[in-house]
Amino acid sequence: MHEYDSLSEDVICTLAAAAGEDNVAMVEPMSQHTTFKIGGPADVLVTPETPEALVKVLDTCAIAGVPVTIVGNGSDLLVGDRGIRGVVVLLRENYAHIALDGTRITAEAGALLRDVALVAADAGLTGMEALSGIPATVGGACFMNAGAYDTCTADVLESVTVYVPGGPDEGAARLRGTVKTLGRDELGMGYRKSRVAVEGLIVISATFSLSPGNAAMIRADMDTYQQRREEKQPLELPSAGSTFKRPEGYFAGKLIMDAGLAGARVGGAEVSTKHCGFVVNTGGATAADVCALIEHVQDTVREKFGVELEPEVRRIGEF
Ligand SMILES: Cc1cc2nc3c(=O)[nH]c(=O)nc-3n(C[C@H](O)[C@H](O)[C@H](O)COP(=O)(O)OP(=O)(O)OC[C@H]3O[C@@H](n4cnc5c(N)ncnc54)[C@H](O)[C@@H]3O)c2cc1C
């Protein structure tokens, strides 16, 4: 396969035919598509509206040898200041259909967990309350096995329909992907891990299996979880959630606070004074600012406590 250089007019036309002309944007700033509000431009951003369009877009990129990056709500991402080469496929609000069928809910990958949880609550179905405050899409939640308050995505997942990328470099037929539905037991879900992430599968949609409950209690529980988040987390400023994974036997936020790093800054990036586990964008922070602050926090915590902090935020693109 040739090294990717730039997208040809032909490929851009094929993408526009697959996804619709209005759903293809050139040189699109990723700062508009991440919760950190940081990130340089994607060469091309495509927002397919149907599973068929999504598969065509992915096949087109595979055949043309164009790198693809999937982005959901961008709530776990630090995109480099120089942006992302190739095609970013953004799966969000125009790929977010949710369908209720008895105690099951099937949602397209771009639906927010919150919106799935609201449909469940309206139908008096319990199981998603603790997940409802995670600002994830269904696709991102399956990729990360996102979780909170002792519940994770796998707990309520029944199956996931995925695009499995084709084999490398053996002609167009092999490069095309296939679509498969995998049951929960086939998804290799563990603590913040999944077969989706390990094998580079692309989530098209997911089905959740819930239990009948009391609608008023479900809504009250969702409100309580949201209140706990608002009290503890700096939700008023852009961030990508917890910056570091929890080191065994410790809490990242407490270590950072005890190291005297609350409020530490590089440029517009700051260790939140409300919750030291979060790096926040106080305005105009660059990816370089965030990386430098992450390094400063890692160095200081290593020096003071001998603990290695590993970033949880995923860095993508060129820095
Ligand atoms: C304020 C705040 C609070 C948070 N709280 C929590 C929490 O309590 N628990 C928790 O687990 N996380 C939390 N997070 C982190 C984040 O919400 C999760 O990691 C979430 O799963 C990311 O989903 P996303 O749709 O934003 O994915 P993105 O950030 O867009 O992408 C994350 C990864 O998933 C991949 N991906 C996205 N969609 C698909 C798809 N359709 N198919 C295949 N791969 C895909 C991307 O390529 C990328 O590698 C929080 C973040 C913020 C900003």
Image (cartoon, rainbow, N blue to C red):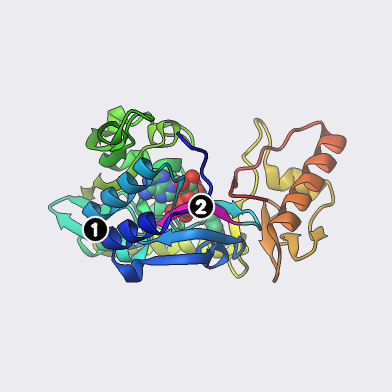
- Residue at position x 36%, y 56% in the image: 10
Say which of 282 and 286 sits in front. Answer: 286
- Residue at label 1? 50
Q: Quadrant of the N terminus?
A: top left
Compared to 228, does 70 lie above or below? Answer: above
From the viewer's perspective, is residue 82 above or below residue 230? above
Q: Whole-percent x and y of residue 297?
A: 79, 46
Mark 1: amino acid: Thr
Question: Magenta segment range?
Answer: 83-90
Q: Is residue 87 magenta?
A: yes
The label on residue 6 is 2
Instruction: Tell me which label, 2 or 1, sits earlier in the chain.
Output: 2
Q: Position of residue 258 (x, y in %)?
A: 81, 46
Q: Label 1's element? A: loop
User: What residue sits 28% from the left and 38% below the top?
Assistant: 176
Q: Residues within 10 Å of mark 1 (few under 14, many from 20)?
A: some
